[in-house]
Amino acid sequence: MEQAMKTGLESWFQPLPDKQCPFCGHMLRQLTHTVASGETYLLGIYETCTCAAAQSEQAAAMAAKAEAERKRVEDTRASTVHALMAASGIRGRYASRTLQTYAVPPGDERALKVALNYVLKFEEQREKGMGLYLYGTCGVGKTHLAYGVAHALIEQLHSVICRSATDILLELRGQMDGTANGTEYETMLRYLTCDLLVIDDLGKQQVTDWSMAQLSTIFDGRCQDMLPVIVTTNYSDAELIERLALRSDKKTAASIVSRLHEMTYDVPMSGQDYRSR
């Protein structure tokens, strides 16, 4: 044992003299650890006294350490949520549009139920590559509901991007023309790889062969990679196809609408105008 202790001392800590417990006076020894080879090493710390006062102090120290770790995890999470929110594109009036602040228009109770269930089962829906297709007349709360889902998923630490179809195309065009920061490739990559992409007001954007190609790239890429989208539009399928085909190929427009239904659950909304309430 003496030889084993000597070998251990050469590798780890020097011997410490016994010390008294400050509460009861019991003599406390330095802790040791014996490895598989039989060598015993000094650990450089003392055993904890078994008296009530010493045990209480140790419990308080452990509680303080646990609280500090909880606070560290909480602060890290809050920082991550803040960064995800900043990267999401949610700003202005939509920064406060959550599922909790959504006032259900009469007749659209199902829409809110679908949205809440989607958040609850997002991991399952993401594995399926399924999103939501919110459609109906103006002002019934489609954007609020979509952004509410986005808020909830960001709180779950998912990467989400929320943009109108028009803004997406303006950003890509600006980068292609050199009038906007970043590159078209970098921006397209973000739209293709985020956990959830929310595209608001599909059908209101300016339609060209180029814009249709960009939208097709986004929808096709996310569909192939099983990544969900949430889309809002004021138009029926027939109206949306006509809108998308104004200056482009109607067949391509129809394929985009078909692809959207393939990768989303239909959520019709027809309640009272949300903005007039």
Image: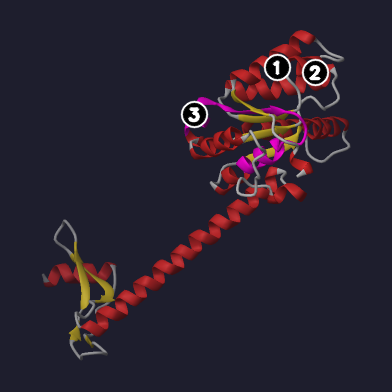
**Residue 27's spot in the image, x, y percent?**
18, 86
Q: For the view shown, which residue lies furthest in the top direction? A: 251
**Residue 233's spot in the image, x, y percent?**
73, 28
Q: Badge 1: how crowded within 10 Å, few (<14), some, or many (20+)?
A: many
Foreground residue, 93 or 108?
108
Distance in Å between CA atoms under marks 1 and 3:
21 Å
Write the start and end of the magenta stretch as one range.
124-150
Judge whether residue 140 is colored magenta. yes
Residue 222 is left or right of residue 171, and the answer is left
Q: Mark 1 or mark 3, which has the lower sequence index? A: 3
Residue 271 is left or right of residue 67, and the answer is right
Q: Mark 3 or mark 2, which has the lower sequence index? A: 3
Foreground residue, 4 or 41?
41
Residue 240 is left or right of residue 177, and the answer is left
The residue drawn where x is 15% and y is 67% is 4
Mark 3 or mark 2: which is in front? 2
State yes or no: discs 2 and 1 in contact (Cβ < 8 Å): yes
In the structure shown, which secondary structural element does the residue marked by tag 3 occupy?
helix
Q: Which residue is mark 3?
A: 127
Q: Which residue is mark 1?
A: 256
Q: Quadrant of residue 54?
A: bottom left
The residue drawn where x is 79% and y is 42% is 276
| Numbered label attached to residue 134 | none
Distance in Å between CA atoms under marks 2 and 1:
9 Å
Q: Which residue is mark 2?
A: 244
Distance in Å between CA atoms under marks 3 and 2:
29 Å
Please say if 231 is above or below 41. Answer: above
Could you tell me the amino acid type at mark 1? Ile
Q: Mark 2 or mark 1, which has the lower sequence index? A: 2
In the structure shown, which secondary structural element does the residue marked by tag 2 occupy?
helix
Q: Badge 3: how crowded within 10 Å, few (<14), some, or many (20+)?
A: few
